[in-house]
Image (spheres, helix red, strand yellow):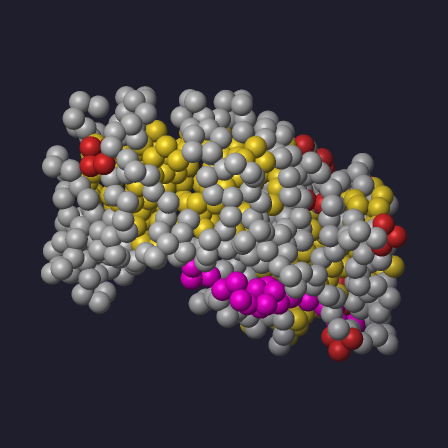
Amino acid sequence: MLLFPRMHFLLVFLVLSLLTVVVPPVPPAPPPAATRVAPATTHPQGPPRPPTAPLPPQPHPQPISHPAQALQQGSGSSTDSTTQPSPALTTGAPPLAMVPNHGQNHPQVRFLAHTPVGTLFFTPQTVVMALPLPDTTTDVRARRPDLPADAMQAVLRLRWDGAHPHPTIQGVEPLPSQVHYLTGSDRAAWHTDLQPTAAVVYTDLYAGIDLRFDGTDGLIKSTYTVAPHQDPHQIRWRYQGATNLRIDDTGSLRITLPMAPHQTTPITLTEQPPVAWQVIAGTRQFVDVRYQLDGRTVQFLLGAYDPTHPLIIDPTITYGSYLAGSRDDWGRAIATDIDGMVYVAGDTQSSTDFPTSPQAVQPVCGANPSGVCRSDAFITKLDPTQTGAASLIYSTYLGGAGDEQAYGVAVDAQGRATVVGSTHSDDFPTTSGVVQSTYVDEWDAFVTQLTPDGSGLRWSTYLGGEGDDGARAVALDPAGNVALTGYTRNTPLAFPTTSNAYDQTHNGGVDDLFVTFLNSTATTLQYSTLLGGSRSDDGFGIAIDPQGHLVVGGTSDSTSRMAGQTAFPTTSDALQTDVPGGLTCPGGNYCPDAVIAVIDPQMVGHASLVYSTYLGGSQTDRGTALTVDQTGASILSEQRCRQTFHCFRRSIVRWMARRGL
């Protein structure tokens, strides 16, 4: 069982290839000619050879642990009922769709499967796995969009040694769906009505040995069926593209992938110990089996078994449950509506295969002039009462030719999702009549509201000045007015503020926190202010309390404890009026602390700042999310870090005596 490390993908299961939507070709090419397996000249026959060394006692095999707990071990493709696939694929989870190649991909590819953490290409001599290498940098301003696509993924090739060079490859168990590849405007180049199957079978991969690939609900199964009196020791394979292979103390095979330029540690895949069995007189008899390494080649080391009955060897590849394409996908915000529907917002580098719906306002990514898509925002609506493809209500890209990231989402009573984030595109989709329909420079914040079915934009606007601006959180009041917060960089053409603002001027540090209140159609700035000191201030969470006050949470390392510096603005009744710690962070700096502020947008100037305080201790504290309850109490999610930067999250409830609020 090959365990993929947890990448930064959404933990929402979706069978991508069952959706009858626009599915463009997948870019990774099959292995070049230089990597082909040489044709085998002989196929060993006869009864199985005994193991070269006795196997140690092994416990009775237990069911494989994976997301579908009811899933049993699979089996091979023989028509004998004793080797038919077990009820594993009838647990209610949709099977993974194996799509035949009818010209939409490289001619060496016979079938392909879009899995949540990459794409599989089935060729006569190899299975090619195109796996994304996630960029672990969470701050978009430090990410590496300049890297080419091939630097952001690993290509791992499973190659069989001594196998038949041209085994028969066929799809079995047709699925009740069709797949269409609609690429470009030339209909003659489209590939439509492709019939996916639940499994792909390699017949006589070795003499008397078939191999079946299938999958469901978070796993891919590769099942070898060895016919009676055939030799399972023929099965030998390598992982081309891995930098290291080893068998650990548990018997798992550890496969290390090469590091990409944006990574600091390599990704290691774990193939858990295999399971083998025979069905004799109607009873499943387990057979001892383990991996054996011969240099870079892997094979099975088997205990005693009955050579007169078929032998099943069943490694299982698990990949988790995700909503994703073939590259990095970041789920950054989630919300629910009054009907319990789930809305997920984030950004994706999966430029061709992130799951979208047919009615999506933007079913394809926004490409730059060279035709390259690097990072777009997305918004997806899911029905948690449904399973598989039926759970996808709508899903759409949102972006232009540059990069986008979505950080916040909120939903009104009519089911209209409002998404906020950052855009580096001068052609980000906006609507007329909004407060800022044109791009200014660098990164601008954006605020977009979709129609309830996700097929259109109710309104969409930029919000920013000449420097970097980004919206990180959004909240709606009962009338549909929109509150948002984030950061703005100090530039001559500043972030838009209003005349009733607490502070219209940037305070000279790196970033100031902003708080903005729009009307329900984004045509008017009702209130917009900066909050900050002489260093860096950022807003990460916002809510609207029952009295209509805007409650914002964030982070600040601004302090008046240093000569010539100013702190984040606080009120006289603040719990803490400055950074409470000492010069304990690297570089002799004060550590950042969480901040929380309450603003009344109906008031003017300094009177609009109803309450403001630092929240922290001697180390780093960051306010990462915020909400308010029905009494108006603020609940702030905080991340606390030690000097070693090992962080943990905690939720703290601050009951603020806010002058009678």
Q: Is 158 included in the stretch rendered in magenta? A: yes
Quarter of the image for residue 607 reads top left
Q: Name the residue nearer the viewer: 661 or 15.
A: 661
Q: Name the residue nearer the viewer: 314 or 38.
A: 38
Q: Position of residue 266 (x, y in %)?
A: 49, 66
Quarter of the image for residue 657 reads top left
Residue at (64, 61) in percent of width and height: 369
Start-end of magenta stretch: 141-162
Q: Position of residue 273 (x, y in %)?
A: 59, 57
Q: Is residue 573 above or below residue 184?
A: above
Split into 4 quadrants, where in the image is the N terminus? bottom right
- Left or right, residue 619 beside residue 374: left
Residue at (64, 43) in percent of width and height: 362
Residue at (62, 42) in percent of width and height: 396
Q: Position of residue 472 (x, y in %)?
A: 41, 44
Residue at (19, 28) in percent of width and height: 658
Q: Is residue 628 above or below residue 137?
A: above
Q: Is 182 included in the stretch rendered in magenta? A: no
